[in-house]
Image (cartoon, rainbow, N blue to C red):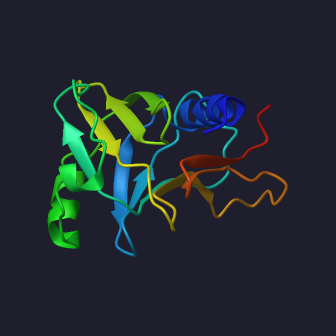
Amino acid sequence: MDNSHKELAEKTLKYLCIGSQIEGIKFYGTQILISESETNGNRIDGQIYLNIESRFKIFKSYPEYIPNHKDELPDMDWIDGYKILCELRLKRITNVQLGEFIPHLFIYFETGEVLFIFGHHDKYESWQLGVWNNSNKDEHWDVIAVPGNNIAVFTPLR
């Protein structure tokens, strides 16, 4: 993962997420809806979302061991996955970071919990966080864990 892309991705993720809270789930795919925050509230025109396309886990705190392979995480059907994600309802996000070499996504909550999303896949995107339904077509917000342990960033931030 390119260091400059990682830095821009983390800056964008923090801008979109810190101070926000989980406000809902969309039942098409695995999509979490994230609220606006005091940081981005008047500058984001649209819905902040997180698509999860790989395995994930909620840890009670930052894990001592980071899974190296998807098989080290639970393989849940959509019903069990949504039950787990519903536990994050209205919890405030305090930090966001990416893995050092692989774009694993770590979302920290005020409770101390950490949502970990596995960031490696050989052929597909593992996760995507961005803004949809944005009426300003010149303002594209997306951070995407892409194949090959890379990160794609589309943002008006620089």
Q: Give the side of residue 2 with respect to residue 113, left or right.
A: right
Residue drawn at (27%, 41%), measured in percent from left and top? 67
Residue 28 figure quarter: bottom left
Quadrant assignment, res 6 = top right
Residue 87 coordinates in the image, percent (x, y): 18, 47
Q: Is residue 79 above or below residue 70?
A: below
In this rendering, position of residue 155 left or right of residue 65: right
Tell me which residue sits at (30%, 40%) in the image.
Answer: 115
Q: Position of residue 127 (x, y in %)?
A: 47, 56
Q: Is residue 155 above or below residue 6?
A: below
Residue drawn at (75%, 61%), measured in percent from left and top?
Answer: 135
Closest to the observer, 62 or 19: 62
Q: Position of residue 11 (x, y in %)?
A: 63, 29
Instruction: Name the residue nearer the viewer: 134 or 63.
Output: 63
**Residue 86 visible in rendering:** no
| Quarter of the picture holding the C terminus | top right
Closest to the observer, 5 or 23: 5
Residue 49 placement, left or right of 9: left
Q: Is residue 20 visible?
A: yes
Taking the spot 52% from the left edge, 41% from the top edge, the residue there is: 36
In the rendered view, does 117 fall on the left or right side of 96? Answer: left
- Where residue 74 appears, as percent x and y from the top left, is 16, 56
Residue farthest to the right, as pictured: 138
**Measured along the vertical axis of the image, is residue 32 above or below residue 89?**
below
